[in-house]
Every structure is written in structure tokens, then in C-alpha cells.
Amino acid sequence: MSKPKVAIYWLASCGGCDEALVDLGPSLLEVADAVDLVLWPAALDFKVRDIEALADGAITASLVNGAVRTDEQAHMARLLRRKSQVLVAFGACAHLGGIPGLANLVGSAEIFRAKYLAPPFVDNPNGVVPTPHAKVGAHELPLPGFWPQVHSLEQIVPVDYTLPGCPPPPPLILAALHALLSGKLPAKGSVLAPERALCDTCPRKPAREPGRKPVKLRRVHQAAADPDQCFLEQGFVCAGPATRGGCGESCIRGNMPCSGCFGPPPGVEDQAAKLVSAVASMLDTRAADAAALAHELVDPAGTLGRYAIPASLLTARRDRTEP
Amino acid sequence: MKTITIDPITRLEGHGKISIFLDDAGEVERAVLQVPELRGFEAFVVGRLAEDLPQITSRICGICPTAHHMASVKALDDLFQVTPTPAARAVRELVYSAFLVEDHALHFYYLAAPDFLPGADAPAATRNVLGLVAAVGKEVGLRLIDMRRRLRDLVAFAGGKATHPVLGVPGGVSRPIPESERPKIRELARDAVAFARDTLGIFHKVVLGNRATLDLIRSDGYSLTTYYMGLVDEQNRLSFYDGWLRVVGPDGAERARFAPRE
């Protein structure tokens, strides 16, 4: 019997998800032994044409990381969807748009300006920016079209499962791979991580003085965080209440607040909106200057929706107003 | 006229496509590398909180996130005009050194060395780290995995996680490393140096010890005459965390030396 075919691919991403797969260590060798890896640009030399040559549905599972913002990324997402029985959105960018999704707060024209026109070290007197069609000598050199917005994978193709995290932690990856290979998968659409919020397993003590509420938000450079006490209770914005657990509370153990990379817990549609309410309830709204308190949060979208702008209600609104 | 397309380029972090245009005689007329990806960090970091940037910019590259994280933290030191305490500086330098070794091990074994063993002519299915481990022995593979795991565990201990660490704050780090960890870290450092020496031995054997490989890497197509720039300490020794930028010519003679701030 031939081994199940597995493809690993990256869209708009950083390679951290691929590194997380390498972090499986000896288990990666076992997995590589049990499957036929047909694509993994970070580590293997297979090409797109090798995937195009496969029959539809020939790949047992594709693990796709990264967000979608170009014609080529959408094409690859659709190609891998067609060739795969199971498609896994792997990591925060594929799941919710991730850090590249912060670009939706900016727009593509500003990205081109900041990248190709504005920097003092760029010499571009003719104001050249990338276009889908360009010629070098007599040769046509197409570039994939650059979309106005970043999208999560699910906004482009149907996704069967999601592995959250930036990057997903190796224990969750391994459990997902075992489930995939043994066919013991949960219901389609499942997020392959615990069904609870991060706060449920946080190692920190909640309030020292029950009922005490901070009146002032604090930023990480303004005070040393007590390593044993709840960040929110100390006034630091922590995404724990609106973030799915399962990461091993790694950032919290590093004495930094959660920034929300696992996305919302079950039942929460919009992570940023949920966090707005969590942060608001922690502030002392009896203070006379409640409105001023709210303004202390200077970048609410980038802070509370760090990894989830494309998947949030915010982007849905922007999309509709786009020309 | 024929075009050879390599899509995607592989065994690196990043997206790329190479088109090689041949003329009627089959000679290379032109070759072009395209990077068909853009995320726009330059634009979307504007408006974010400064102290969040070490965690945002690390996502430029998930293979070398610690380098981007550190560069951003050092920029924050400069912005806030604070000098890290000696202990914080030591933690940062330790984390950066651990990262540097595991990252170089990744580069050599996983990304670059498969070009030489099993070699450029080997089938695509084996021209990778798995093929390399099969050729040099599983023992080497398991030692590589164990070494990288221990080094990455140290980064994670200090910085929460190895891919996209969180330790950097302006003027310091988010948590200390307790004295009780010292023996374990010393042992790790000793083992890492031994591992690096043995890796150098593999390089000599696999790359320099192979006539065909040696001819290839000494050929015109493979050689690039260039200047080099790197960070050095007071005595011009290679330094990775901090120091002066030093530029040398192709002959190794110093051409410039200046503080990065300049």
C-alpha cells in the first residue's frame, strides 16, 4: 500500500510554522517515514508542477500556513484544496490573517509607498512599483496581482481543520498529525486545540485583593510585571480572556502578556470585540475620567486584534466599502 | 527560445521564482529572480505601540525571529534612551548566541548541505535533510535534533518560545535567568562548541573532501568577489549582539569601521 501523501505549503507567512514542524524533532523523522511528503518548500525541493501533475484528491492532507493576499497565493490555496482530501489551516496567518493581516489597517497603496518610494535608501526616481505585467528586455515577467486586503485561508477556500498559534506548538501539531494518519479526526471545521480560554489554564494567581480594579493601564516598559499575578489585574493588556488555550501559556511563562495568537475561544466570533469588553470591565469605570482611561489604549485594533484583523468584523466592513 | 522556470525556489525562508531565458543557441541570455510576495511591515508597523514591535517584527522571518526581535529591542533601547542592565544584556547575549548556533545548524544541515550531500544531481526526493541524514548516519541526525532542541529550549526558557520569543523590552528583558540554571547552560555551551567543531569536520569531509564539489564551488559561476561587513568587538573579533560595523575588502584589509548609530 502506498503511503499517504502530505503537502506543506506557505502563503503570506514567515517560515515560523515550518520551523515548528522541524521542532517535532525525532517525531518528524517518524512522520516523514510514515508519509510521502510531496511538497514542502522550506525543506524539500519539490515544485509546483509536481503538485499540478497529481490527480485531484491524491493528497491525503495539506498543511497550509500563511495568509492570502496575492493571485498566486489564492491560486496555490485553490490548487492544494483541489488536490487534497483534507486541508488544514496551519497557524495564525492561515487561521485569522495573522501579523500580515495588520496590513488591512493600512491599504495596499501605502504599502507600495512605504516599500518602494519613501525609504531614503531606495533610489526610484520614476516611481516604479510592482505591476502584474512587466517586461525585461524581450521577456514577459508576470508578477502575481497584489490584493487590497489580506485574507485568511478560509475566506478563499473551504478549510477542514485549523491548527491555531503563531506558530502552533509541536505537541498540538503532533496530535493533529496522529489524528490525520489514523483517520480519527474530529468533526470537520474543528479547531485542533482545547475548547477553553487561555485564562482557564493560566498559572498566575488572579486578583490579590478580590474586587480591586486598576484604574490605569500600564505598558510593559512602564513597570516590572509581577511574575505570579494576573497581567490584567496589574493593568497590563493581556489577551487571555478572549484567546483559546493550548499554547502552554508560553508567553505568560516568559513574563509577557498573551497577545492572542491562538485566536478566539469557542463561541466568540470576534476576538478584538471580546477583548474590548474584557479590558473595559477591568478598568475602574467609577473614576471621573472614564473616557480618558479608554484613550490610554492607543492602538486598540493592533493591540486587541493583533492576529485577527482579516477575520474580524472590522475587515468585513472595510471590504464592503472598497471601490 | 526556451525558458527554464524554477518555481518555487526551496530550502530557504522566503518566496522566490527564477526564470532563465535561453537564446536560440541554448545559451543563457538572461536570468531573473522574482520575489512574488510582499507583506508590508514598513507600512503596517506605523501606528503600533513601539514596545510591541520586537514581537511584530520577529514575524518578518520565523526561521531567524530572534535576530529581528533583538534588532528591534536594541532600537527600542535607543529610542527610549535606556541602557540595559549588565544582567539583562547578558541574558540577551546568551539568548542570541544560543539562537545563532541552532540557526546555523538549521542552515547547514536542513537548508544548504543537501546541495552537496546527497548532492545537486540526486533526485529531488532525497536532496534534503532526510537524504543527508541517511548519508551521514542517523546518529548525526539525532545529535543535530537533540542539540537544536536544547538550544531552542534555552531561548524558550528566557523568551517564552523559540519561534517568536517575547523577552525583549526597552532597557532589559522580561524575566531573569536564575543562578540555578548556570551549570546546565554551561554544559549546553560546551556541547554546542563540540557540535560545531564536529560539524566543521563534516563540512571538510562532505564539501571540501569531494573533488567534484570543490571544483564546483571554486568555479567562476560560484564565486563572487565582494566586500564584507560584520559586527566586531574592540579587538575586531566577530561579535553578534553588539559592537562596531567593520567593512573589509576582498583582500581582507579594513576599509571602514564605525558605530552602528553613525
Image: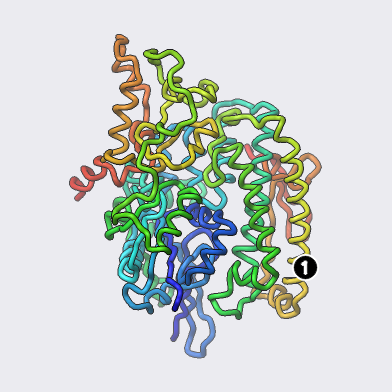
Establish if A315 lies above or below B7: above
Q: Position of residue B68 (x, y in %)?
A: 55, 45
Which chain letter goes with mark 1?
A: B
Q: Is residue A211 visible?
A: yes
Task: Tell me what residue is drawn at x 57 percent, y 50 percent.
Answer: B64
Horizontally, residue B187 falls left or right of residue A273, namely right
Q: How is the image coloured?
A: rainbow
For the N terminus of chain A, give its image quadrant: bottom left
- Disc 1 on helix, strand or loop? helix
Callout 1 crowding tier (Cα within 10 Å): few <14, some 14–19, many ≥20: few
Establish if B101 lies above or below A78: above
Task: Tell me what residue is drawn at x 42 percent, y 72 percent.
Answer: A48
> Which of the pair B9/A107 is nearer the observer?
B9
Q: Position of residue A282 (x, y in %)?
A: 35, 20
Give the residue number, with chain letter if any, for mark 1. B204
Residue extending furthest toward the bottom:
B25
Which of the 4 image quadrants contains residue B92?
Answer: top right
Q: Amino acid at mark 1?
A: His
> Which of the pair A253/B213 is nearer the observer?
A253
> Which of the pair A127/A277 is nearer the observer?
A277
Task: Tell me what residue is drawn at x 61 percent, y 77 percent.
Answer: B120
Q: Is residue A215 visible?
A: no
Horizontally, residue B202 falls left or right of residue A205, namely right
Horizontally, residue A289 falls left or right of residue B101, namely left
Establish if A209 lies above or below A25: above
Which of the 4 image quadrants contains residue B170?
Answer: top right
Task: Tell me what residue is drawn at x 45 percent, y 59 percent.
Answer: A178
Residue extending furthest toward the right:
B235
> Which of the pair B146/A251 is nearer the observer?
B146
